[in-house]
């Protein structure tokens, strides 16, 4: 299976990569390799890979800065996943997103979210 994994510079991304079985073809991207908030960069980078699945573990998680820079939070945490979903729809990949915690720091009631962007 060809996997694209975003957010591999963070703790969750690194932990995920450490657990992926070796038989998968993994394309890992940290923020320096792919800014998911940049629609054109996402499409130009991911579409040619024709991934079977896109696992989005990227997020701008600095809560205080999210509150003081809402445009950046929206770009990274809302538009970024949308750009990944559009690439998935164009290439037939399945998308998987990391769960978001609430503003108060409590975990969401569901541990995972999933959608097929077709």
Image (cartoon, rainbow, N blue to C red):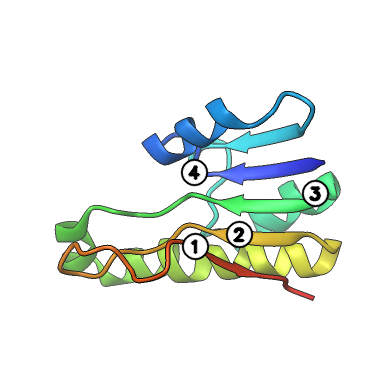
Which residue occupies 67% across, 61% down? Answer: 95
Q: Residues within 10 Å of mark 3 (few under 14, many from 20)?
A: many
Which residue occupies 52% across, 63% down? Answer: 80
**Secondary element at image label 4:** loop
Q: Which numbered dot is residue 51?
A: 3
The x, y position of residue 79, in whole percent, is: 51, 70
Whichever of labels 1 and 2 marks the residue nearer the N terminus, that label is: 2
In the rendered image, the quadrant that contains the N terminus is: top right
Vertical placement of residue 62 versus 81, above or below: above
Q: Which residue is mark 2?
A: 96
Q: Which residue is mark 4?
A: 7
Q: Which of the 4 image quarters holds residue 89? A: bottom right
Whichever of labels 4 and 2 marks the residue nearer the N terminus, that label is: 4
Query: How far, Cα to Cα, is label 1 from label 4?
Result: 16 Å
Query: How far, Cα to Cα, is label 2 from label 3?
Result: 12 Å
Q: Residues within 10 Å of mark 4 (few under 14, many from 20)?
A: many
Q: Which residue is mark 1?
A: 112
Q: Nearer the viewer, mark 3 or mark 1?
A: 1
Query: How far, Cα to Cα, is label 3 from label 1?
Result: 20 Å
Query: How far, Cα to Cα, is label 4 from label 2?
Result: 12 Å
Q: Nearer the viewer, mark 1 or mark 2?
A: 1
Verify CB contact (< 8 Å) between mark 1 and mark 2: yes
- Towards the viewer: 48 or 89: 89
Vertical placement of residue 26 versus 103, above or below: above
Vertical placement of residue 96 versus 48, above or below: below
């Amino acid at each position: 299976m060809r996997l694209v994994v975003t957010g591999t510079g963070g703790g969750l991304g690194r932990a995920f990569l450490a657990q992926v079985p070796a038989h998968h073809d993994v394309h890992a991207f940290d923020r320096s390799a792919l800014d998911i908030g940049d629609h054109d960069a996402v499409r130009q980078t991911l579409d040619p890979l024709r991934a079977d699945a896109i696992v989005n573990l990227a997020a701008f998680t600095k809560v205080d800065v999210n509150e003081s820079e809402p445009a950046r939070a929206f770009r990274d945490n809302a538009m970024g996943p949308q750009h990944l979903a559009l690439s998935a729809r164009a290439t037939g990949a399945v998308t998987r997103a990391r769960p978001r915690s609430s503003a108060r720091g409590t975990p969401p009631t569901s541990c995972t979210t999933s959608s097929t962007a077709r």
